Amino acid sequence: MRSVGKGRGGEPDEERLVRLVARGDRAAFEELYRRTAPWLAVRLRRRCADEQIVAEVMQETYLAVWRAAGAFAGAAVGGTAVGWLWTIAARRLVDAFRRRAHHAQPPPTAALPHAAPAAEEEALAATVGGDVGDALRRLAPELRQVLQAMVLDGLSVRETAVLLGLPEGTVKTRARRARLAMRKALA
């Protein structure tokens, strides 16, 4: 996803689209949705196998984007439109899991042991090279999931626990084990 400058054919990038959405531009909102919805849906499905929850989160996310586009600070604070969008979606997903937890068991996660790597994992591997990239790739999948949720997605221990369907203590233990493994690999 592009987040700076102009897109193909002089189209505005996602940040510019968010700024136009803040002014009530429906065409910009539709273009932002067209560009980001497929990617966002895939990313949400990697964390939740329940299509109903994914659909609800998508709807809530884009409603929040429409309502709060004016609050987007963007590059001024080192952020990107795509990162802002994912932050909204991740929080909405955690909220959906919390609502579901009050009524029933949390939905099954979509992460299967034999599943192909997620796009963000491939992107991370491509951007994080050298010793750090090697250390990340050697981490056990359950440790890498916790690091991804807490470090890359910026979720709290509680949010990570809800997202991954784990007790908070397990999340803390895995985060500690991941940090120790990374330190050892990089020493």
Image: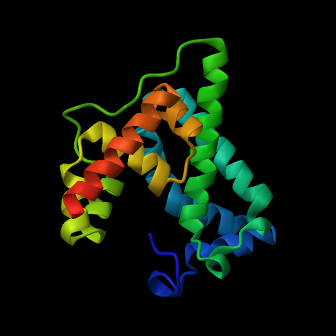
Q: Is residue 173 left or right of residue 10?
A: left
Q: Is residue 73 left or right of residue 32?
A: right
Residue 56 seen from this side: yes
Colouring chosen for the image of the structure: rainbow
Name the spot of residue 115 as percent of width and height, x first. 23, 37
Position of the N terminus by quadrant: bottom left
Q: Which one is nearer the viewer's eye here, 123 or 171?
A: 171
Q: Quadrant of residue 76?
A: bottom right
Tally of numbered tags: 0
Q: Is residue 88 above or below residue 8?
A: above
Position of the C terminus by quadrant: bottom left
Q: Which one is nearer the viewer's eye here, 169 or 125?
A: 169
Q: Looking at the image, which residue is at 59% across and 68% down?
A: 81
Q: Which one is nearer the viewer's eye here, 7 or 125?
A: 125
Q: Looking at the image, which residue is at 43% across and 29% down?
A: 170
Q: Quadrant of residue 33?
A: bottom right
Residue 51 seen from this side: no
Name the spot of residue 49 as percent of width and height, x first. 42, 29
Name the spot of residue 104 as percent of width and height, x first. 59, 12
Q: Is residue 93 above or below residue 64?
A: above
Q: Looking at the image, which residue is at 72% across and 74% down?
A: 20
Q: Quadrant of residue 47?
A: top left
Q: Which one is nearer the viewer's eye here, 60 or 93?
A: 93
Q: Looking at the image, which residue is at 54% across and 81% down?
A: 11
Name the spot of residue 46 as percent of width and height, x first. 39, 40
Q: Is residue 177 above or below residue 18?
A: above
